[in-house]
Image (cartoon, rainbow, N blue to C red):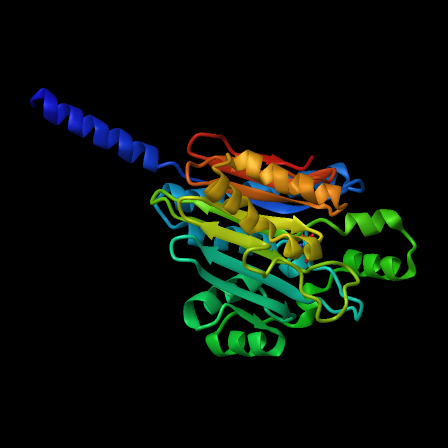
Amino acid sequence: MNIRSFLIIFAMSSLLHSEENFGIVVHGGAGVMSGLSEERQQQIHKKIQETVSEAYEILEKGGSSFDAVELAVSMLEDSPLFNAGRGSVYNSDEVQEMDASIMDGKNRLSGAVASVSTVKNPIKLARKVAEETKHVLLVGEGAERFARDIGVDIVDRNYFYHEERLKRLLNSKNKISKLNENADKIGTVGAVALDKNGNISAATSTGGMTNKMPGRVGDSPIIGSGTWAQNGVCGVSSTGHGEFFIKYQVAREVCVRIEYLNEELSDAAESIINELNDLEASGGLISIDHKGNISAPFNTKGMIRGSQTNKTDLISKIY
Ligand code: ASP
């Protein structure tokens, strides 16, 4: 082999190598988290680690980031520990109304559902909206009818029954415990991932906020606010006071700063969370850029989160 071909092969292999960065980051909501017992913290760590490692395995085997984020979010929806799917909080009518969205950064394919009450995994339905309809967002009865038509798992409302969440609703209505009100602001779930082909995806799912008005929809199913994914730039999943996240288009804002202002991911992510802090809007976000860098800022006492990339070990953190 002459020196020229050696150099070409060497350059190509290092280029390919740099394109192979991949990883996943998940969150389980941001909040005060002051009432979490040691035992509960251990349960949370275990679930987050299990979720990250299963989603990471998909990426390691060359699978898509879209599959990885859907799996991660559906695993967290199945756990009563988080405010999504099984552990969703109650609205003022004592009903659990759930919202979710998913986005593929390769082609901006997006799907979302809002105010569903009998869909076992709202994130799976959101993906079906993206892939099987001409629409982006389906709500309420129409979304549930679509779930039945397409064969997505429907469960009895009792499946979501959660004694602790119900107590918190009653406390919140009676304004008995300020601590419990704060504790409710945790638990929305989300995931963002970069796969070996450079595709970025993001997904978010929530029961919303305790004692919300029936029909209230937060940022989680809003593409650009709760969820955003854009190949070559970044992917974001948000958690926090949804009304602010909608008004400040938080998820897209992070990517816009990178795209137009050439900011680093951590600067872009931190600046929007600081801006929200100045408005007394609590929350946080997880994000990954096209190089596999991760940033997960929050302005609350804690944010449940975990990650693993081809360059960094599996971690899970609460505070
Ligand atoms: N962002 C969610 C909502 O407003 C709640 C949360 O993330 O805690 O519905």
Ligand 1 sits in which quadrant?
A: bottom right
Q: Residue furthest left?
A: 2
> How many numbered badges does the structure rendering display?
0
Image quadrant of residue 96? bottom right
Q: Nearer the viewer, residue 298 or 265?
A: 265
Q: Nearer the viewer, residue 215 or 68?
A: 215
Image quadrant of residue 130? bottom left
Judged left or right of residue 37, residue 217 is left
Q: Quadrant of the C terminus?
A: top right
Q: Quadrant of the N terminus?
A: top left
Whether residue 121 is visible: no
Q: Residue at x 75, y 46 (%)?
A: 279
The location of residue 310, given as percent across then percent down, is: 42, 33
The location of residue 191, given as percent across then percent down, is: 53, 48
Whether residue 10 is visible: yes
> Eyeballing the image, is 89 above or below 180?
below
The location of residue 19, given as percent across then percent down, is: 33, 37
Image quadrant of residue 88? bottom right
Q: Residue furthest top?
A: 3
> Eyeballing the image, is 270 above or below 158?
above
> Eyeballing the image, is 268 above or below 158?
above
